Amino acid sequence: MPIDFSKIPSPCYVIDELLLRKNLEVIKQVQKAASIEILVAFKAFSNWGVFPIFKEYGFGASASSIHEARLAFEELGVKAHTYSPAYEEKSIADILKYSSRISFNSINQLQKYLKRAGQTGVGIGLRVNPEFSDTGYDLYNPCKPGSRFGVTAEQLGDGVPPGVEGFHFHTLFEADSFALERVLAVFSRKFGPFLSKLKWVNMGGGHLITRKDYDARHLVQLLFDFRNRHPVEIILEPGSAFTYRTGYLVSTVLDIVENKGIKTAVLDVSFTCHMPDCLEMPYKPVILGATDERAGKPTYRMGGISCLAGDFMGNWSFDQELEPGDKVIFDDMIHYTTVKTTMFNGVRHPSLGIWNEKSGFGLIREFNYQDYKSRLS
Ligand SMILES: Cc1ncc(COP(=O)(O)O)c(C=O)c1O
């Protein structure tokens, strides 16, 4: 049974279980074909209400904070591979408890925690910075000059620091395997001489393996070739790829207002609170049944429910005029979106649900006044 949006309460993020399982299957097959380990990057998706589904596929987790590491342990049942730009004294003991591997961002941090990490038997990695990324978005480029991420080849000098068994790098954003190939060429040139001393290389995230045109065969071949040159264990930690195009944000038109000929549909959701990447990146999301602005068709801005003046995006055209009560459904609103929401302005937080083709809609979580109140004092 295809998803029936009339059965979904508004506002609500809804995951389509079938689409989620398709992604998990694709990633599992790539993991097997390439003989690598693929971790779920919690930063992109960590709604643990659906982890029972993830557990069926047996992926590990990549964490970047104490809370993500703990959540991986408690709800996915795995010890995380953890990386953070810096670790605090007050949380390092717990991070080590919940991690199987820990990567440090700098030589200072490595030296500070090396002894403690070594005593726990957690594998120790160092984030390196290949200083190369061809992502077009500065916001998502960790390799720009002045970046705070990782040790450059120049800073590393001519040796792997004692205790380090793996390198971790992250350079890509929603990229294909050919972008990884370009990164690996630079990485091998700069760091290749060190790799014979290492057990593993974590090639970070940004691999959009589940996009229709992603060439998984090329990825597999690329990784085999890399391992032929450098016999190390390879780890990838994509985030977006797991929940890419697996669900929607369902909203409702509350009012239509007009100013200087611009019609705005005021919704029960907010771009700044519930779709923040649209404003941050920025990008224009797809609305089901709507198109980009077309002359002669009813055309609207979508306006958020918060008081932020810039909480709107434009413009979409529809076949018919919109009216209060109509549903507006934003596509691809799961990865990064559901983890980045806020309760700014006290606006109602969308519920979280899942659509199963046999049983229909299942509500996972609703949010209420207490959720809002409890974070404020
Ligand atoms: C270190 C690291 N690993 C993995 C990821 C996940 O990347 P993506 O969700 O683009 O696959 C990120 C994203 O910022 C990251 O910083």
Image: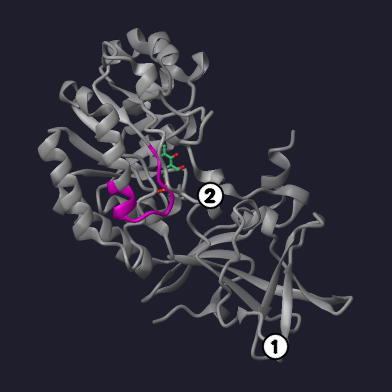
> In the rendered image, which quarter contains the C terminus?
top right
196 on left or right of 141:
left
Q: How many marks?
A: 2
The percent coordinates of residue 142 (x first, y second) are 48, 37
Q: Tell me what residue is drawn at x 26 percent, y 10 percent.
A: 162
| Residue 264 drawn in magenta | no
Q: Give the residue pinned by disc 1.
A: 295
**Which residue lies at the image location 50% right of the left edge and 13% below the top edge?**
89
**Marks 1 & 2, CB-CB < 8 Å contact:** no
Q: Is residue 157 above or below residue 374?
A: above
Q: Is residue 29 above or below residue 134?
A: below
Quadrant assignment for ligand 1: top left
| Left or right side of 118 for 173 | right
Residue 179 on the magenta span:
yes
Residue at image x 34%, y 17%? 156
Tell me the residue that label 2 is attached to.
137
Name the amino acid, label 2: Tyr
Question: Does the image show residue 32?
Answer: no
Residue 2 visible within the image: yes
Q: Which residues are magenta?
A: 170-181
Decide which of 45, 302 is in the foreground and name it.
Answer: 302
Q: Secondary structure at mark 1?
A: loop
Instruction: State how the image is colored.
Output: one colour
